[in-house]
Structures are given as structure tokens and as C-alpha cells.
Image (cartoon, rainbow, N blue to C red):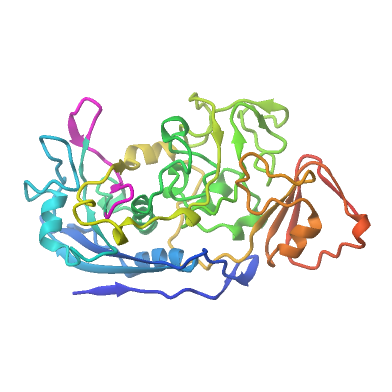
Amino acid sequence: MLKTGLLQRNLVATVVLVTAVVAGTATADTFRIEIDYMVDTSTIGGHSHEPTQAELDAVIRMFACQGHQLILEVSDQIPHHDVLRRDPQNGAFFSYDGEAASFGALKDQYFDRAGQAGWHYCIFAHQYEGIDDDGNYFDSGSSGIAEILGDDLLVSLGTFAGEIGTPFDRASTLAHEFGHNLGLTHCGSGDCDEIEDNSPVLASIMSYNYQLEGVRSGLLCNDLIPDSEAGLFRDLDFSHGRMPTLNEDSLVEIAGTAWRPVDWDCSGFIGGIVSQDLSSGGPTWCGNTGSLDDLDDYDEWANLQDVTTTMTAAELKERPTITCITATEAAALKRADCPNPDLVLESCIGGSIYHVLDRGTPSGDGSWFDPLGSVTAAQNAALGGSAIILEPGVYDESGSGSLILDKPARYHSVAGGSLVR
């Protein structure tokens, strides 16, 4: 039976604290994924890896909020294999079709859209075989694997709750693995060998911090944004590049994330300039001992690439792959006091985040949205429901007459910034 999930772009959305026109990307694209799924009937009760319509709709909405159309076709129930195997000769995964329990063999038999440009193929499976640095194979325990800039992806939650994961796990992992197909990594635009997979300022389900915790829920639980700005983030989302650049070797605690002060070195005291690795472990950064780097947020939505519309089948045969968080890693990242996010059909976000600098230049690499040199400019540009963050400095705008703050935006003053009217 063919089931199609299809949702057109929402033009108007209402979110808690935000009512505004949806801000779409520069171009509206259509993305297509055919999904097959395994069902285990070998034991009493068994389990099914079939995604529900609610899970599909949540991912469809995520893309629709950015003006994109995502077509998900759930096609076939396929044979259940506890572990999908790699090529015993060279370790290849997606192209290997030498035995029944392989992704390639299943794709050869069940992919209905083979040869059609613009289609990706996904299997909701149980588990797959990992490979270590010495070439040894093992049952990975991973939530999924995908090609970077390719057409194949796998969701494999067999070692997670109920052998299928929670509804949010399934929706978020589908979006996460598809993000890899569209060119996204676990560390934004940085070097993942240095930054690693857990950056707190990559406000995206591509970061291990938020894949299974949810972006909004994870930011709130780690006190990185105030409750008043929760409506500017969604749990299921790629990043919009809205968080600040942080230098792990020189973290100003009173400035924190610009939203609020943060105890970066976990000393119990907020103050001074400290050094702390923030991106190599969890459930918080406390105790991390990795390298110190610059952490940038990254506008992932503005940098999606779908190579299935331009590459040939031969070019797509075996693309570079990336493995994803394991159940063991997810448990280590989980804060006991952070609740699991519920899967809901989230509204779109209308407001934006404006970073105002009295010197009129961007901080770091300018990763903030629209760095502006005056409060007047931010006030004129902001949609209702936006947040306007003032960096330290004196904003004397009396020469331009009275400044009327007539939009429902929130103004935050960071570490001594002030507005003189």
C-alpha cells in the first residue's frame, strides 16, 4: 500500500509568544524520500519499525515551515533482519548487496523509484554492522547511518526504547539522517574531528545534544536561553544560525550565550573569563577535557544541497557515509532532569533574533542573524515576536529623535549594554 505524506507551505503560523508571517528560505525546494520498513514477527508481540503518520507529518511540517515541500512515500513492509551487514571485503555498507541481510540487496528488490532523479531511499530497520578503525565488524547500536550528499539513509533504533525508539526519536532521527543526505554534519561548518558532535550552540537536531532531546527542550534544560524566548525555537529543526560564536579558550561567563549568563566552567560561580571544552561530551559540558575551539552556529537551512537531482545513479552508488549516535552515547548524554520531548505537530516560527552591536560590525564570523549597528535599525527590521539582543556599549540614539518601541519584541541587555534615549 502506498501512503503519501504531503504538506504545503504554511503562510501564517501562530506559536507561543510569536505571531508572524513564516520566514522561508531563498528558494523553495521539493525533496522526496521512499521509505520501507521492517516488522519482526518472530516472537509473540514482535515489533514494527513502521513510522506513524504523526511522525512523518512532524518532519514534513519541519520542512514546510521553511517553504520546502517534503514528500514521504511509505511503500513496503520488508523482511526483518536483526543486523544489516557490510561488505566483508571492503566494509562498504549502502552498495553491498551480496547477501539478503544487506541494504543493497533490499534496495535492489524494493526501491520503486530507482533511476528516478530526485528520490532518496530510506529503510526503517533494526540495526546495522559497524566497523572500527582496525577493520573489525560489530553490532553498532547506532540510531542510523547515512550518506553525506547522497541518496541513501537508514533509521535503526533497535537498541533504543522498545526496540523502535520513542515517536520523537523516530521523527527526529529520520530528519537527522536525511540532513546528512543534504550535506549536513554533526558540527555545523566546523571540523568535526576537532569540534566533535555535541556543540551546545549548534541549535539543531544534527547536534547530538539535541537529536533526541529536542532543540528547544535541550536549550531550556541547559539554561542556555530564557523561558521567554522558547517560542523562537522548535524541538524538531535544523539550525538557523541564531546562536553566538563562542571561543572555548575565552568564555565570558556574564555574557554567556548573550541570552543569559552561563557557568561555563561549572564552578558554581558566574563571573570572569574561563576556558572549557563544551562540545566533546555530556550530559552537560562539565568535566569535558577535549580541545578548545571556536564554536559557531551555522545556518543549515540556507546550505541544504540535494545531489540526487544532478548526480547519476553510478555517481550515487556509494557516497561517503556518517554513522550516528548510539543508544549508549544517548544514555550518557541524557540529563536525568531533562524530560523526553513529546512529538507534536509544531507551529512555525515567525520572529527572528537580532544582534545589535554599538560598533556596527559582526562578532566572530558574523554568525548572528542580521548584526546591526543601531537599535533603531533592529526595531525597524524586526518582525513581531522577535528578540533583540544588545551587546555591551552605549546606544545613544537621541540624535534621531524619539525611539518608539512599538513591536512585541523582547530587548535583552548583555553584560552592561545600555540604551540611552
Query: Does 227 sit left or right of 411 as displayed?
Result: left
Q: Main secondary structure of the magenta part?
A: loop
Residue at 67% across / 41% down in the picture?
363
User: Of all residues shown, which one is farthest toward the left?
Assistant: 99
Instruction: Please provide percent x and percent y for residue 196.
Output: 44, 34
Q: Considering depth in this image, is 194 or 84 the residue closer to the camera?
A: 194
Question: Which residues fall within the magenta stretch?
Answer: 131-151
Which quadrant is home to the N terminus? bottom left
Instruction: Please provide percent x and percent y for residue 63.
Output: 44, 64
**Height in image: 148 above or below 174?**
above
Residue at 37% across / 54% down in the picture?
182
User: Magenta span has 135?
Assistant: yes
Instruction: Please provide percent x and percent y for residue 2.
Output: 21, 74
Q: Quadrant of residue 399?
A: bottom right
User: Magenta span has 110?
Assistant: no
Q: Can I make out residue 79 in this image?
A: no
Query: Does 384 sit left or right of 398 as displayed?
Result: left
**Height in image: 395 above or below 402?**
above
Q: Considering depth in this image, is 407 or 265 the residue closer to the camera?
A: 407
Instruction: Please provide percent x and percent y for residue 9.
Output: 47, 73
Query: Does 52 sit left or right of 415 as displayed?
Result: left
